[in-house]
Image (tube, rainbow, N blue to C red):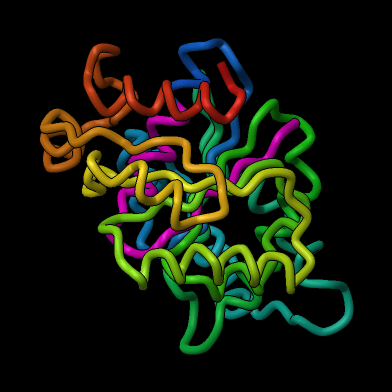
Amino acid sequence: MKILVTVGRGGTGKTSFVALMAKYFIEKGEEPLLLVDADPDQNLGEMLGVDLHEQGKKTISELVVETFLEEGGTTVGVPPTERIESRILSHGMYEGDYFDFIAIGTKWVEGCYCLPNAALKGALSSIAKNYKYVLIDSPAGLEHLNRRITCNIDDIFDVIGHPSKKSFDHVERAYRVAKEVKISFRNFYVVGGFRFPESLEEEIKKRLRFKFLGKVAYDENVEKYVLAGESLLKLPPETPAYISVKKIMAAAGYA
């Protein structure tokens, strides 16, 4: 079992990268897969063609509200993660032909994401071993690293957009924060998003001390699919974005 986490600033294309990475593993027959949307914006499900509500499922945040607010549950005594774990598996997980999917959902109450994150962390610790790969789409920013949804990661992919000092600083901070909160990971990679100029690939290799795997090609097909709400898993295999992601995954050792 391997856990792959994708991070990045907002708008870099990290969610579409996760979806195309899932397509890559599915087409290679590397199953079963677990896809985790840890971003409150909840875009990954749409890019995978999964609507939890249409499937009669709920986000982890919704299940937390039901369990601890609407149904009068308490957070005192038995750890909340133990109380909700079975509900996540039965009411929160979409089970598909090629992958399973869970999402943390939008903020459950005014305040922090402490309970939903703890619930997700507990569920992952129990079920991750049942999958060949676990792909996690993280929210924008770096505060989620402090929550340590999972402490043992194989690969971190930091997707950057336009090359800038802020982008480079973000990469360095992401690596530093992951180390400071004692997240164990084997590899820290940098990936150029679809807006990253191809002409600057050599420059970024000089500027950053982390392995640059390449960039996701700009692709009108991806834009059309996203606008139409179509699953990126249905993209034709010859589409530029998917071809570039295949090369990126090969560079990361997943050929």
Residue 46 % position (x, y): 31, 43
How far across and down, in percent of the image, does residue 87 sit? 66, 53
Near-viewer residue (247 or 47): 247
Looking at the image, which is closer to me, 140 or 78? 140
Extent of the magenta region: 1-22
The answer to whether residue 225 is magenta is no
- Identify the residue at horizontal 42%, vertical 21% (top origin): 246
- 202 vs 100: above or below: below
Q: Nearer the viewer, residue 230 or 27?
A: 27
Name the image quarter holding residue 122.
bottom right
Whether residue 19 appears in magenta in the rendering, the answer is yes
Left or right of 28? Residue 78 is right
- Report the front residue among 169 and 61: 169
Question: On the image, which quarter does residue 56 sit in?
Answer: top left
**251 vs 118: above or below:** above
The residue shown at (45%, 51%) is 206
Q: Quadrant of the C terminus?
A: top right
Q: Residue at x 38, y 39 (%)?
A: 17
Number of callouts in the render? 0
Q: Residue furthest right?
A: 77
Q: Position of residue 25 (x, y in %)?
A: 52, 21
Asked if residue 176 is positioned above or below residue 160 in the image, the reply reads below
Question: Can you give x and y, in whole percent of width and height, for residue 118 in the image?
Answer: 70, 68
Point 31% across, 49% down: residue? 13
13 up-or-down from 163: above or below: above
